[in-house]
Amino acid sequence: MTRSNAGSLADLQRAFQDYVLASQPAFTAQVRDTSKADRITLLNVYREGYALRLIEVLESDFPGVRAMASPEDFDHAARAYIAAHPSRHPSVRWFGKAFADFLAAAAPYDETPAAAEMARFEWALGEAFDSVDVEPLRAEAVMTVPPEAWETIAFAPLPSLRRLAFTHDVPPSWQRREEVEPGALGVAALGTTVPWMIWRPERMSNFRSLEADEAVMLDAMVEGRPFPALCEALLPHVGEDQAAARAAGLLRSWVEEGLIASFSH
Amino acid sequence: MEYTGGMENVGFGLGLRHEHYEEILAAPGKVEWFEALSENYMIAGGMPLYWLDTFRRDYPMALHGVSLSIGSIDPLDEDYLKDLATLIDRVEPMWVSDHLCFTGLRGINLHDLLPLPYTEEALDHVAERVMRVQDRLRRRLVLENVSSYVTYAASELTEWEFIAQLCQRADCEMLLDVNNIYVSAFNHEFDPKDFLRGIPRERVRQFHLAGHTNNGTHIVDTHDHPIVGGVWDLYAEAVRLFPGVPTMIERDANIPPYGELLAELDVARGIAERVMRAPAHEAAE
Ligand SMILES: [Fe+2]
């Protein structure tokens, strides 16, 4: 027996969704008034509820952006994002995934690049929070590596590691997000690009800025390159005679900070 | 395929909410069980799963989903079912519930519980999907009646007739949300006791209680207020008709301290105790 989707159940669902998303009025004919309320009032419970629910999700996932924008501007940006990016995931937890890209590219929000950077930072914090738990490597484990293994050894970071770069003073401003009135959070331009990272060694997420050479070496490590290649990556920043010592020093601090998950050689 | 469900009364529970994690640790054993929202924990790892495992060690749990979209005309989301099955293996829940509704189509999730028309066509469609989900999860599905705001011109059955036939055909169970019955009865102008009397007694696996917002012309299921008197009265009637069914309170906004919800749960305990102690008298049949 074949079954078609052309029945009234399919028509009703399509019309309902079109009413919620695009205000297509055809659906009103399928709904009844009650003795207390007309059908438009009742349908608006769904239409307005849809927007309000998702605005609330963005408000709670992006408190820093919310602190930067006036309530009206945030509402405007949220509604524009909701229209451009309907949710396609079972959990609202993923709804804000494209918010930073949207703010970076869509007028008029593209005129405030600090907002997109703030959104990117807040999204990365959430990703670190929900990432797979891996116990950080202990310093003792690195001590036991035989000298010849350093030619081939490669390190892997925690799954929670997120690499970011900001042209505005984003993470320090984010820390002040609850101290200011909505719309009053200023995020200064830096005039340069500063590399940052987020990682979660245990239950709490950490974040800090990186030195330029540290960022280059970290990115090489994330790519899975072996230790000699990490030293090489430092060469534009330090002399050839300094590179191995600098690389070893950075590696030691990353292990101490609980940023490294494992190694192989 | 048939799956049996052991109807055990595990007592009174609350929804597991991150706002209460520390308070639950500080005041252990105040509820008999928790209901966890499945989608919050369908992730790779991290803190949400850490907390889930922590509380699961000390409390039985039920899993409650919002995105199965059992009534949608979209194909069943196999990835979703796979993630849910993984979570079920982790939690070993007492039962797994979702809502009798659709949440969107064409791959879009409106994150809302949209009512189905109560028609033979919808009944065929949902029953077939419930059976497929049950075969996939190898357990009975528990479906909750939703609050609804619109009445469809197309509906041929009452909501309770639809539910009773669905349970029969698909061999599934019901999560009776007493507040949702109250809300829908107000909005659609039916007697909430007719609803309760229409549900087969052996199919009720769990009760939900919650607060709502009354706009005068219609009531919206907001889960942001304490439970009102009319819902407590209806709960007493529900306990009389379906004795020994586990009960929990849902609070999703304006979340008060844990202790306040525990006090509200004590009201539910008191009502259930009073009803059970009252001389047995049959409901008008
Ligand atoms: Fe409910």
Image (tube, rainbow, N blue to C red):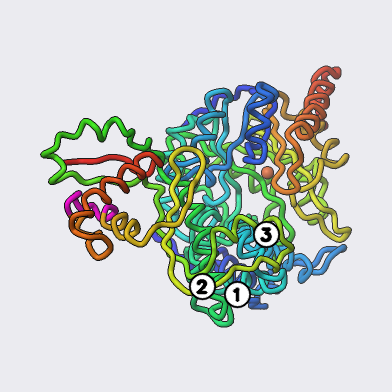
Which image quadrant is residue B120 in?
bottom right
**Protein chain holding label 2:** A
Q: What stretch of residues is rendered in magenta?
A: A221-228
Is residue A222 shown in magenta?
yes
Residue at the spot of label 1: A80
Mark 2 CB in 8 Å range of ligand 1?
no
Quarter where residue A18 is shown: bottom right
Subunit of label 3: B
The residue identified by callout 3 is: B155
Three-letter amino acid code of the residue under disc 3? Ser
Residue toward you, B172 or B260 = B260
Which chain is mark 1 on?
A: A
**Contact (Cβ within 8 Å) of mark 3 with mark 1:** no
Identify the residue at horizontal 83%, vertical 27% (top origin).
B271
Q: Earlier in the sequence, mark 1 or mark 2?
A: 1
**Pointer 3 with pointer 2, Cβ within 8 A:** no
The one nearer the camera, B234 or A259, is A259
